[in-house]
Amino acid sequence: MLYRKLLLLIFIETCVATSNSRFPKNFMFGCATAAFQIEGAWNEDGKTPSVWDTKNHQIPSVIRDNQTADISCDSYHKYKEDIALLAQIGVTHYRFSISWPRILPNGFNDTINQLGVDHYRKFIKELKANNIEPMVTIYHGDMPQSLGDLGGFYNASSVQWLTDYARVLFDLYGDDVKIWFTINEPYETCIWDGVVKAYECSKNLLKIHASIWHLYDREYRAKQAGAVSIPLNLNWYEPETNSTADIEAANTKLQFSWGFFGHPIYKGDWPEVMKRRIAMRSRGEGFEKSRLPEFTEEEIEFIRGTSDFFSANTYTTSIIRAEAEPPFGEPTIESDVGVFEYQRPEWQGAASSWLKVTPWGIKKLLVWLYNEYDKPQILVSENGYSDSDGRLDDPIRVNYLRDYLSNIREAMEEGVDVIGYVVWTLIDNFEWNAGYT
């Protein structure tokens, strides 16, 4: 396959210590995008505004350089060009999201937009014609504004809203789509609205994910033979030293990041360290009870076991140091975690200030996830490198992809069951608050 030949050429040209073991023949190589970031056509063919369309058009703008995603890559019209690029690269899979307000203009399943339905039907047909399997993300940031006005994911009814939307997608496209993702990066979906609200929102997201998984398992799996997961995200967290305190601090950070959603799904309930620390912090801040909502036994059982493989979006590494208990005051996620996090200044950086090139971290993360969650199959559903100049002669990105893939392959040789690797992203796109910068 062209993609695998390209990897071999990269190895020969750069002459670094890279694993030269071949990936298995059934290993999935893919690229990923999100509808809002590439499609454009923001008000065409029956699509209504999403919460991000509304944010785009606020005055004064909160987006860098007053940019919008109104046109972006124009992939709604140029999807065949996108698929031709995928075919040229030689990928086996393409992970993309379906725009909720393009399918359900008022957010609810009582009105289905046929023009939106037809677009994604043609899109999937074109992928199949090029021997590329679709991976569909049900929700990737673009909630209909009509539902945002009702409180979005802070409204308990959001469990039913998104489950109804998933049912529509399973009915429409499930015969052709065998890999589904429920909610992209649930951690990022809630955490920016303040930690007090974030924990309630996160509980709703876990219930939404579980509801969709149970719907698929109960009504669609037998006839459509697909799989459902949820893309979790964040970094590898390396202890600063081998001291017991730093090792415990790094594990605390891992539980507050990957364990935040991974523990309820794979083990049941929040991680113990989250429950203990948030209860302690809440008491010190004057709350009558913990800011972390409890699960009922029924909810724990409903959420546990609702993932057919582990989906991991990861890009970089942080160093973790134990520190003294932060003073009590305004609640924050940082004080709840209670560790010091940083990245080494000598590490090579990308255009995104948080993205440092640390390929060794992905191997450590994969080994940890595999052991922590009882040896699941793992799909690296996002990984990549950001720049700000758009250069085509791009050795830093080439080296990043080569070295991360090499470390993934080494993790596999140590027994980790990695089933695929998906590059973020296929094409330059609208990067949320950063616009096109």
Image (cartoon, helix red, strand yellow):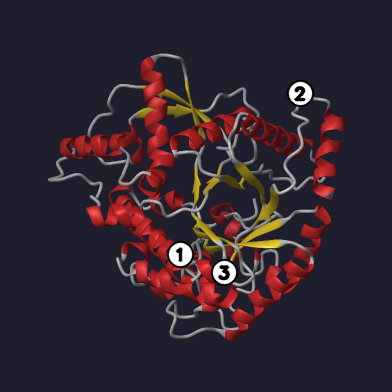
Q: Is residue 331 left or right of residue 16?
A: left
Residue, disc 2: 17
Q: Position of residue 357 (x, y in %)?
A: 64, 32
Question: Is disc 2 surrounded by few (<14), some (14 to 19) or many (20+) residues within 10 Å?
Answer: few
**Cα gap from disc 1 to disc 2, whole angstroms:** 44 Å
Q: Name which residue lies at 40% across and 20% down.
A: 246
> Looking at the picture, which amino acid does disc 2 mark?
Ala
Q: Is residue 293 left or right of residue 176?
A: left
- Judged left or right of residue 325, residue 34 is right
Q: Nearer the viewer, residue 65 or 3?
A: 3
What separation in Å lies between label 3 and label 2 (alpha carbons)? 43 Å
Q: Which mark is residue 224?
A: 3
Question: Residue, x 53% and y 28% (percent of image)?
Answer: 343
Disc 1 from disc 3: Cα separation:
10 Å
Q: Position of residue 141 (x, y in %)?
A: 50, 61
Residue 428 lies, in percent from the top left, at 70, 54
Marks 1, 2: nearer the viewer: 1
Q: Judging from the image, what secondary structure is the residue with disc 1 in?
A: helix
